[in-house]
Image: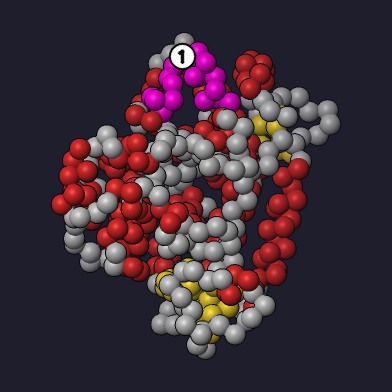
């Protein structure tokens, strides 16, 4: 399944982009899972059915960027955007109490690239300026604020539905992938003069259902799957506790932030399991139930309000670009379902941790 998904996005590409993925900087990402440590948890519905790494994600963003832009510079900015990722990725935001933003949990891209002589030589060979590839947010194709689709967000959505939520097959994902196009400008293909987003358009991924069996509603459905699994009580509780776990093991000296950067997740877990403090970890990965806490419940009770990830894609049809809510009969029903999930984030959560672990982790809890 992984090979098919990755092959879908690479297509027949065979060019200078390939050599960068053999550098130490990008190969390090093979040891960083895309789903923020969910590979290790005990709740089966939260375990990805296949390991998907930040390396896979970076390749897919980069190759898709090449397909849609034919720009090596843009593709490389996509390839490098996660090179500062720490083990367990966004769990480090929860560790710092920054679940709502999740924007300060990795090392600076430029500082990482400067440590790789081979990679810098490749950039020189290809006449690519370092400054042009260290900030992918300058390319709307790669990164764009919600509600737009961008390739980083697209891969997060599709990979989540395929590997994590397990709601779609590779064949269904392929149909959705083939709907992606990129418009640098609208060239008069918009008649909605009331939309600030369209009036100030500066490049964005647009959906086109021509030549595929999937439709716009199918795309909004996968966006909703992605949003809802991230907002689920299980994911929110596990991520909050994972942040506490990282704080605890850092405090007792099992690893530091540099280790989280340089070591793979398996190496970090091995350190924990070979330490005298392993019982807290073993208890954490044995959690198999998360509930909304009642007034008289005991245990590690947590309030979790994470970043809400959603999108309202632009669609192209009848020679016009418009937002999906203008044409999708399912949009408002799906949006109401998501609103219900969002409303539940104010409720406290509790999982089945032992009393000893609750006592240890309670000091890291943020109310």
The picture quadrant where one finds residue 260 is top left
**Residue located 73% across and 29% down the image:** 367
Q: Is residue 255 magenta?
A: yes
User: Where residue 219 appears, x then y in whole percent?
Assistant: 53, 68
Q: Label 1: which residue?
A: 253
Q: Quadrant of the N terminus?
A: bottom left
**Residue located 84% across and 31% down the image:** 295
The front one of 297 and 151 is 151
User: Where residue 73 appears, x then y in whole percent?
Assistant: 29, 58
Q: Is residue 20 above or below residue 332?
A: above
Left or right, 208 with respect to 125, comes to right
Residue 338 shows in this picture:
yes
Give the residue furthest to the right: 295
**Crowd rating for badge 1 (residues with CA inside 10 Å; few <14, some 14–19, many 20+):** few
**What colour scheme does the image use?**
secondary structure
The picture quadrant where one finds residue 3 is bottom left
Give the residue furthest to the bottom: 318
User: Where residue 329 appears, x then y in whole percent?
Assistant: 66, 77
**Residue located 81% across and 34% down the image:** 294
Q: Is residue 88 magenta?
A: no
The front one of 292 and 240 is 240
> Magenta stretch?
244-260
User: Where residue 60 appears, x then y in whole percent?
Assistant: 35, 56
Q: Is residue 217 above or below residue 291?
A: below
């Amino acid at each position: 399944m992984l090979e098919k998904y990755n092959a879908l996005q690479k297509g027949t590409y065979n060019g200078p982009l390939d050599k960068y993925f053999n550098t130490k900087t990008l190969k390090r990402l093979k040891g960083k899972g895309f789903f923020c440590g969910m590979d290790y948890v005990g709740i089966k519905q939260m375990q990805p059915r296949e390991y998907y790494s930040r390396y896979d994600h970076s390749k897919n963003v980069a190759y898709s960027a090449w397909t849609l832009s034919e720009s090596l510079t843009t593709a490389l900015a996509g390839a490098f955007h996660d090179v500062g990722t720490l083990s367990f990725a966004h769990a480090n935001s929860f560790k710092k109490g920054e679940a709502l933003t999740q924007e300060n949990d990795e090392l600076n891209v430029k500082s990482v690239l400067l440590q790789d002589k081979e990679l810098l030589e490749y950039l020189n060979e290809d006449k690519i300026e370092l400054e042009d590839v260290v900030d992918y947010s300058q390319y709307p194709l790669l990164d764009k604020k919600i509600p737009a689709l961008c390739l980083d967000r697209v891969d997060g959505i599709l990979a989540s539905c395929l590997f994590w939520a397990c709601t779609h097959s590779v064949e269904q994902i392929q149909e959705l992938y083939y709907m992606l196009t990129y418009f640098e400008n609208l060239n008069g293909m918009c008649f909605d003069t009331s939309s600030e987003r369209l009036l100030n358009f500066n490049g964005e991924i647009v959906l086109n259902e021509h030549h595929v069996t999937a439709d716009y509603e199918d795309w909004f459905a996968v966006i909703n799957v992605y949003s809802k699994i991230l907002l689920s009580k299980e994911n929110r509780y596990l991520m909050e506790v994972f942040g506490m776990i990282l704080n605890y093991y850092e405090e007792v000296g099992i690893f530091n932030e540099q280790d989280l950067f340089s070591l793979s997740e398996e190496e970090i877990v091995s350190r924990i399991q070979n330490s005298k403090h392993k019982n807290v970890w073993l208890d954490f990965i044995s959690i198999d139930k998360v509930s909304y806490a009642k007034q008289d419940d005991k245990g590690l009770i947590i309030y979790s309000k994470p970043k809400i990830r959603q999108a309202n894609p632009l669609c192209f049809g009848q020679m016009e670009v418009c937002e999906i809510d203008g044409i999708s009969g399912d949009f408002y029903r799906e949006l109401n379902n998501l609103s219900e999930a969002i409303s539940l984030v104010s409720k406290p959560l509790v999982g089945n941790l032992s009393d000893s672990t609750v006592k240890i982790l309670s000091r890291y809890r943020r109310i």
